[in-house]
Image (cartoon, rainbow, N blue to C red):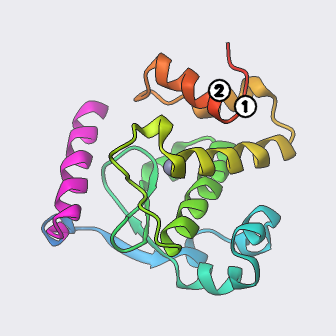
Amino acid sequence: MEWLEDIVFSVYRLLRRLRLRGLLRLGASTRRFTDVFKGFEKVEAVKRIFGEETEKVLRNLKVEFIAFGGYMGVDDVTGHLLVNPRYLKSGDRVDIYLDIIHELYHIKQFMEGKELFDNRFEYVDRPTEIEAYSYTVQEARRLGLSDERICEYLKTEWMSERDFKRLAKAVNVSCC
Ligand SMILES: [Zn+2]
């Protein structure tokens, strides 16, 4: 039923844009980032994103659990990190770690006032995405992940083969 979740998530996004999100908040719970994800204030890749503000930013960051929608994202109205708890439970540890780095990068962009979902661009061409993915790929390489494994990480079921290749090329990963 992934497709159904995707549709519900799209509707949720739209309502959020229209500031009607209260309608869909039923059951959503908010927690502190630092209570859900431990030790990220000590991760070099995170410290490079926020600098001296790292601890403060992470302490103030809120995590909102969503019952639908694939993995993780940033709410472009509240700046909350949206997380599907099912993904946290069953997802690959390395993928989850890289997703957190990716999303924290979006948090920084949000704090800088950047438009996260600029609809003039397709997802794989959006400058905010390319920046966040490039940063995440750099961290993946530092962890020693092969290009093959990074390609696996970049490929998601909702992305077409064409888009996936375009994204990989934009972030300098060779995927065949
Ligand atoms: Zn992103």
Residue tagged 2 = 169
Which residue reaches farthest front? Answer: 120
Circle 2: is it few (<14), some (14-19), or many (20+) Cα within 10 Å?
few
Q: Which residue is mark 1?
A: 172
Location of residue 38 by image quarter = bottom right
Quadrant hosting residue 123: top left
The answer to whether residue 84 is above or below residue 92 is below
- 144 vs 120, left or right, is right
Q: What amino acid does circle 1 point to?
A: Asn
The C terminus - image quarter: top right
- Secondary structure under the numbered disc 1 in the rendered image: loop
Residue ID at (36%, 74%): 78
Label 1 environment density (alpha carbons within 10 Å; few <14, some 14–19, many ≥20): few
* Left or right position of 140 against 38: right
Please indicate, yes or no, whether residue 176 appears anywhere in the rendered image. yes
Find residue 42 and report its image quarter.
Answer: bottom right
- Residue 161 at x, y = what percent? 49, 17
Residue at 72% across, 28% down:
173
Q: Looking at the image, which is closer to me, 175 or 94?
A: 175
The region drawn magenta spans: 1-21
Quarter of the image for the N terminus: give it. top left
Tag 2: residue type?
Lys
Q: CA distance from mark 1 to mark 2?
A: 5 Å
Confirm or deny contact between disc 1 and disc 2 (CB under 8 A): yes
Q: Position of residue 165 (x, y in %)?
A: 57, 21
Is residue 70 covered in magenta? no
